[in-house]
Image (cartoon, grey):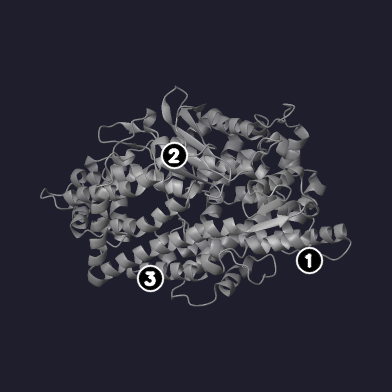
Amino acid sequence: MRKIAFTLLLIITLFNQMNAGNIFSQEFKTTHGAVPFDKIRTTDYEPAIMQAIKDHEAEVLAIANSTDAPTFENTILALEHSGKSLNRVLGVFYPMLSANADDSLIAISTRISPVISAHSNFVTLNENLWKRINVVYKNFDAAKYSHEDKRLLEKTYKSFVRSGAALEGEAKEKYRQLTIQLTELTLKFEQNCLKDKARYELWLKKEDLAGLPETAVEAAAEDAKQKGREGEYLITLYFPSYSPFMKYSSRRDLREKLYRMYNTQCTSGEYSNVEIIKQIANTRLAIANVLGFKTFADYQLQERMAKDTKHVYAMLDQLRKAYLPVQRADMQRLEKFASQLEGKPIKIMPWDYSYYSNKEKDANYNIDDELLRPYFELNNVIEGVFGLATKLYGLQFTENHNAQVFHPDVQAFDVTDRDGNFIGMLYTDFFPRSTKQSGAWMTDFREQHFDENGNDVRPLVSVTMNFTKPTETKPSLLTFYEVETFCHEFGHALHSLLSQCKHQSLSGTNVYRDFVELPSQFNENYMTESEFLDSFAKHYLTGEKIPQDLVDKIIASSQYGAAYACLRQLSFGYLDMAWYTLDKPFEGDPFKFEQEATKCVSMFDPVDGCIMSTQFGHIFSGGYASGYYSYKWAEVLDADAFSKFKEDGIFNQATARAFQECVLSKGSTDDPMELYVKFRGREPKIDALLKRDGIKK
């Protein structure tokens, strides 16, 4: 520990000399306090972070070593308001690390990762600070404070206990070292995923593209051109490239090749995560053990709606029993369809499902992504998705052309309420690039809160996707799934934008992991509502509104593949729980372990060498360890919540107001189940989900 402290002191001393004039050294002097991306240099981050750590530690020591009797104001509230400069710089640095990270930024993250972890421990393992928090907690007079103040005290107290504050001696030091180790491992895992995905390329000739739609062919040609190989075609593992190929290519051999490429990411070579996932699981187990828990899942679920592993497995098993028979019948039907189509027996393999299910869906409903793409031009989709928030909550979105952005693809919008009051800024970042992580997510550059002077500090929110890029001949035309993804991430954004909380650590999306997906998944329900689709879906060339027969087909086909989709999600949930219900260090074979963990919901024969775990960022480098079940948990919530809108009218103002006031604006100021019951009038039921998916008639 002395060596770490000395190293930290040395680094801070060196960077003090470099920090003069750093853009992060004071509040941003911009309209709305927006991030001045044009003035930020990559070299600004590291010295700013080091100085901010120094400043925050001084604040923490002042609180911890105060000779005044501990009170809510001088301890809990003072701690809540500390670390502003650190929040400011990390609030930009980490989003950039995911969305726009070059080698320099990645190198910085490697250097500062253990320093950030050590700083976190400096705060939570400070004995004097913990003693003061403990005194306030035990002597708190709830009658003198608001309900939200009480929630802040409870959250602060529990977070310190869960971060090792109550540990003593060797146990505390062991915890300190384990958390630093975990930070380094998760960062390495994430960097390996980013770098390994970028190196996988499938180069093809024109004759290899049989079955692909024109948009996919043009995109492959454009990707090849960007690599200086005009006249060739490039397929990558990024979703807008990978997904259309797996869905439309009639070349089964190439589908298999691409599938194996995708599912062997980070399994060998310099970017292998095989050993790292074992180390991450074992380190988390060790952390749980030192804190007095048998497994990491036991530790995590203590602060979740599910409460314990028993309730998680009960939900997973209940859904498995309901959906598995339907999926088996669906798969038998699909294999029969594929065999008739090919004129020979076909056993569906994982690289076949997307292709043949799309064929069957098209045959049954005469609808596929390429038929819908012309009606989902990106600018029209933006208008429609934003319009959803206008109809429900009275929000207006005005592009701010003066706001600085971090990449030419990014747009910034000022968001106002129905009375014209500013409620936040929204940044949109839609297209893939080599410096961006795959997938889609929402994040904050700044979270909503009230400052010490009672001013409502409004959030700066970003939604990031990896959508189909425009080509030389066509604008960005999205698939139905991409529009649905936009709705999802926009739901997270609304959760942050509509926040009305006093304390930052309780605001916006700072809620239980199995509650945070409710606002996002709730929004997806509108994708099968004709009133919503008709509001924005129009042909990008003719301006013709999406024909009603296409809308009817979207609705009619919405239950197709629901059982497959559910079991796929359940497989991720079971895999996550398998890794984090380990009660002994894992030294086995991750490949066999994964097959065993998911066999109860497996839909295909195992494929040698293929594995999900080595690229499963949600549970190894993200925040979903012991929490991937949350998507299905929240799906029960969102289906049940939307059933209320179906009863009252999907744009019913009173119902929308209740959802906003009881859920979207409240953050973590109440127990999530209490918030939900206030909105719905009862606890959620699974019936609405089963009915929506066609499992229950």
At 54% from the left and 60% from the top, the residue drawn is: 616
Q: Is the residue under label 3 in contact with that under label 1 (CB below 8 Å)?
A: no
Find numbered disc 3 in the image and state the secondary structure of the residue it sits on: helix
Find numbered disc 2 in the image and state the secondary structure of the residue it sits on: helix
At 49% from the left and 71% from the top, the residue drawn is: 275
- In the rendered image, the quadrant that contains the N terminus is bottom left
Q: Position of residue 508 (x, y in %)?
A: 41, 41
Q: Which residue is mark 1?
A: 347
Residue 56 seen anywhere in this rendered image of the structure: no
Q: Position of residue 347 (x, y in %)?
A: 78, 66
Residue furthest right in the image: 343
Vertical position of residue 185 compared to residue 499: above or below: below
Q: Amino acid at mark 2?
A: Ser
* Mark 3 / mark 2, whichever is N-terminal: 3
User: Is residue 89 left or right of 332 when viewed as pictured?
Assistant: left
Label 1, label 2: how far apart the Cα atoms are: 46 Å
Label 1, label 3: how far apart the Cα atoms are: 43 Å
Q: Amino acid at mark 3?
A: Ala
Q: Which residue is mark 3?
A: 286
Q: Nearer the viewer, residue 480 or 557?
A: 480
Q: Position of residue 636 (x, y in %)?
A: 56, 50
Residue 65 seen anywhere in this rendered image of the structure: yes
Q: Which residue is mark 2?
A: 496
User: Is residue 657 left or right of 77 when viewed as pictured?
Assistant: right
How packed mark 1 is, by other alpha carbons closer than 10 Å (few <14, some 14-19, many 20 or more), is: some
At 50% from the left and 39% from the top, the residue drawn is: 407
User: Is residue 571 left or right of 59 when viewed as pictured?
Assistant: right
Label 3, label 2: how far apart the Cα atoms are: 34 Å
